[in-house]
Structure formats: structure tokens, C-alpha cells
Amino acid sequence: MSSIKKISGVVLVGAVLALAGCGNDDSTTTGGLSGGTTGGGTTGGGTTGGGNGTGTGGTTGSSTTTAHTIVLTYPFLDRIQNMGGGVYRSKAMAIVTDSEGNAVPDGSVVSFNIIDSVIARGSISTAAGDSITGAVLTDADPTKANGTTATNFVDSYVERNAAHRFITSGDHVFLVNKADAEDKNRVISSAAGSIGATTLTMTSSYSKAYPNTVYSSGMTEYVVGASLLGAEISGLDTDGNLRTGSAVTKEGIATFYVTYPANSSTINTGCGSVSSVDTRALPLGSADVYLVASAANSVTTVDDRFCFGSIAGWTLTPDFNTISGTATIKMLLEDGGDKVNLPFVGVATSVVITKNTGGITVTLDNQGSGPGVYVTDQYGWFSSTITVAGGASGDTATITYRTGDATTAVSLKIP
């Protein structure tokens, strides 16, 4: 499966990544096509977006200004806003250019879709009899979000709000690897029989069949999902107002935001390797975020780097800061916004003996990938056992814990 994984402002230790942030804001007007049911979202070459957009067609001299490339980019500094009430908003940009690197005309519409829950996934292999042709995706052996547990489209589900959520009409199917841009985003039809054990029927046909001479058997990968954990996407119109599901360009740039709940049950969703160990959302791997941007239907990009990131200014708080011998310390990791407890984050350590007259040794246990490596639990806590051997009165050491931009130290002194 595709392995482009999530935006993170800090590197986590072990198999888990620590995160630094993402977010967005609710809006009211759609101003035109929002990409909710057409599998692409916009219609180029004319006016779209309820008067706010000018489409993406046109020429300047001998150079075309038709949208050809969309690149999503996320700021590193001042990225996430704390909206209060347990809501964070993350800013992002879509750069839209033609094939010569020219900005598309101001007011060109870019449509967005986002999913935060993957219900099924798979790859299209001729050996298994799979295919994508017309409006139908056929996969003889789809899997759950973890990519290993076999399922079928009728029985595949995620657990959300203490209930099973199965695949339904209106859910998105993203071709996340090895597919033409115009085929990357489709929506499951509401027609009778559109969801079968091995087939999904879309609201619109694919432009090409898969596999094909360009994308051979097993190369084309897909995910099926919906926004079930609270992710919402909006963009700015020409007047600087938020509109649901789309934005318009100015000098080739469309500004958009993702809003998501920021609490210990949702923070870090989809960040790094977190989804593979995220026991807050079952089955494992299902809490994963994919963002799609489209212009003129034929230009679409799928981005899986976004996540429910935290705000910098993390703090590590131990239940006590000084010890005189072997001890177990509990420690809480919180972010710098609403002081949200941060789950599934790796913490590294170092031990420095500052005075040693009695042959003192200090060792740490581990819950991560090696001695002195820890991972916070789903509530943002971890325990560290410090074992002290030998030493004489007055011997000292400092045990330092680090993750993201947070550092704290525990002092040891032999009485």
C-alpha cells in the first residue's frame, strides 16, 4: 500500500511518530460545486462557484492557463489555530499552475474532499480477477484498513460512536496510487446494488480501465472511506470568506483550512504511524486521513500527509522531579494549545551521572523500541522505572526525557 505518511513537526521515537499539527474552520456557503458527488468537484473552462469562481480555462498569448498541476503545501510555523471549545484549525495552500508553471487565472475554483476513516482498501490485481472499468470497481479480496485482514465490501465496517459504520452510498473511493488524475476521486452511487461483496459502483465512470498498459496488475491502490471523526474542510472565496468544500485562487494559490476536534480521543489521528496502533478507533489502521484537491475535474491530487496535529509548546510533567534511589515515575505529555493529552507519542531519554564516588549505575526500562524509549498510552501517560545500583552518599545523576519541543529532567541524589 501507499506509504506516504503524515505531516509531523517533530520526529517520534521507535515505530510511532510524534506530531506537530493541522486544522480548519466551519463555513456555510458552498458557492458552487464542492466535489461531494461528482468525484472531481469542479467544472473547468467557464464560471463556477456561484459567481465567485472563473473556472480554469483560458489562454494568455500563446501559453495555455488551463489547470495542469495542483500541489498542496502546509506551513511549518503558525499553522494551527486554537479555536477554543476543543476545536483546532489548520491552514494549508493549494498551488495551481498550468503545464508551463503559470498561475491559473484568479478566481479559479479548487474543490476539496477529506476522509478521516478508512473502511476498506485494496489493490487491483488481474490474477484475482480485479478490475476498474466503466463505473465499477471490482476487488475479489479487499481488506480492512490495516491492509491485512480480509473482508468484503458488504461486511466491511469501522467502529464509530459505539456502532458499526458500514460502506454506504456517498462514501468516497480514492485511487491513492498509480492512476490518472481524473480518476483519483469517485463517489459510491445510491442506485440499488451499488455495493456488492466484491464490487462498488460509482456515480460517474472512470476515464480509463485498470490495470492497463501503463499501470499494470497490482499497481493501482484504493481506499474507501468517509469523514466520521469530525474532519471538515473549507476554503477562501474571492472576498476572503469561508466556503464549504472549495476555495478560489489568487495569483495561483488557493487557501483552505481543515477543522477537527482536538481532544485526547482524536488528537494525532492519522499522524505518522499512529493509525496502526490507535486503539481509540477500531479496527486498527482505520483512523487515517486523506485529502483530495481537484480543479477542472481532470486535475486531482490525493494527499495523505495531513493529520489531526497538536499545537507546539508541549509539556512533560512528572509526578515528582527528584529521587534518591530506584523509583517508578509517571509522566504526562500535553500540547501547547488546550493542554490536550497526547497519545501514542515516542519519548527518548538520556542519563548523565554528574557525581560518582561509589560506582553508581543508573538504568531505565523501556516500553518502546529500546532501553529508555517510551511511548505514551492513549491518555498521554507513560511510566518510567529508574533502577539505581551501587553509589555512595552524595552521588548524583540527571535523567532527561525529550519529545517534540518538550524536555523535562528528574534529579537523582544518593542520601
Image (cartoon, rainbow, N blue to C red):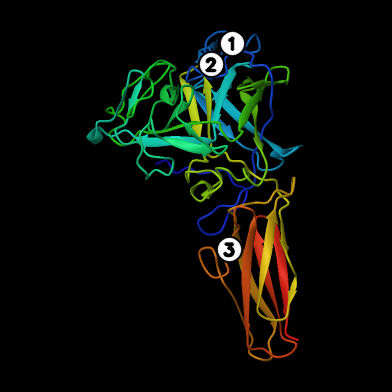
Q: The disc labelled 2 sits on which kind of residue?
A: Thr
For the residues marked 1 and 3, what is the alpha-carbon distance in whole angstroms? 52 Å
Q: Earlier in the sequence, mark 1 or mark 3?
A: 1
* Picture quadrant where residue 354 is located: bottom right
Q: Quadrant of the C terminus?
A: bottom right
**Residues at marks 1 and 2 touching, judged by CB atoms closer than 8 Å:** yes
Q: Which residue bears the numbered disc 2?
A: 42
Find residue 70 and report its horizontal and vertical position in percent: 53, 27
* Picture quadrant where residue 161 is located: top right
Residue sitting farthest toward the front: 163
What residue is drawn where x is 32% and y is 29%?
198
Q: Earlier in the sequence, mark 1 or mark 2?
A: 2
Find residue 27 and report its horizontal and vertical position in percent: 69, 23
- Identify the mark at residue 48; answer none if there is no mark: 1
Other residues around mark 1 within 10 Å, as few (<14) / some (14–19) / many (≥20):
many
- Identify the mark at residue 209; answer none if there is no mark: none
- Whether 27 is drawn above or below 346: the answer is above
* Picture quadrant where residue 316 is located: bottom right
Q: Which residue bears the numbered disc 3?
A: 374
Q: The disc labelled 3 sits on which kind of residue?
A: Tyr
- Whether 32 is drawn above or below 14: the answer is above
